[in-house]
Image (spheres, rainbow, N blue to C red):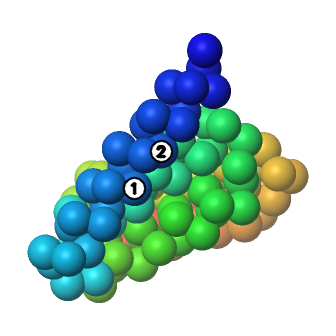
Amino acid sequence: TNEKRFTEAEQVHLRALAIREKAFSASHPDIAQSKCNLAVVYHSRGDYERASELYRASLQAWEEAMAKPPEEYEIVAANYADLLRSLGKARKAHALESRVHKKRHG
């Protein structure tokens, strides 16, 4: 079932995040990516609160890791903006996208 797959994916990504948190600093790109991966699982399963928290943490880690964050940073922001829009927060989503675009493209 889908729920079983989500549970399995959640466990895999939680383990990956735990391993990376032991190996790297909090602002390492691999930790940002792990947080995004876990956020996508929660977003897909409808757990928007946890997904939001992890999307924000992933964006923050990317910002701290690199002066000019990579394309993955924009992907995280797009996912988070999609979640915000689904919650009726279109203005917040637009502001996020504008901030991220400016950070990436000047």
Residue 14, labelled with which disc? 1
Disc 1 and disc 2 in contact, CB within 8 angstroms: yes
Height in image: 20 above or below 76? below
The residue depicted at 43 percent of the width and 46 percent of the height is: 11
Badge 2 crowding class, 10 Å Cα cut-off, few under 14, some 14 to 19, many 20 or more, is some
Give residue 10's mark. 2
Q: Secondary structure at mark 2?
A: helix
User: Which quadrant is home to the C terminus?
Assistant: bottom left
The image quarter containing residue 93 is bottom right
Q: Nearer the viewer, residue 39 or 23?
A: 23
Image location (x, y in percent) of residue 80: 58, 55
Residue at the limit of the structure toward the right, as seen here: 88
Q: Amino acid at mark 2?
A: Glu
User: Is 24 left, or right, of 4 in this rendering?
Assistant: left
Q: Quick one: label 1, few (<14), some, or many (20+) residues within 10 Å? A: some
State whether residue 38 is above or below residue 45: below
Q: Position of residue 31 (x, y in %)?
A: 28, 67
Secondary element under disc 1, as helix, strand or loop, is helix
Q: Residue at x 40, y 56 (%)?
A: 14
Residue 39's x, y, as percent? Answer: 52, 53
Depth check: 96 or 106 in front?
Answer: 96
Depth check, front residue: 47 or 3? 3
Instruction: Please tell me whether residue 105 is drawn above or below residue 40 in the rendered image.
Output: below
Quadrant (top left/top right/bottom left/bottom right) for the N terminus: top right
Residue 56 x %, y %: 53, 71
Toward the viewer: 62 or 103?
62
| 95 to 44, vertically: above or below | below
Q: Amino acid at mark 1?
A: Leu
Identity of the residue drawn at 86% across and 52% down: 88
Look at 51% across and 25% down and name the residue there.
Answer: 5
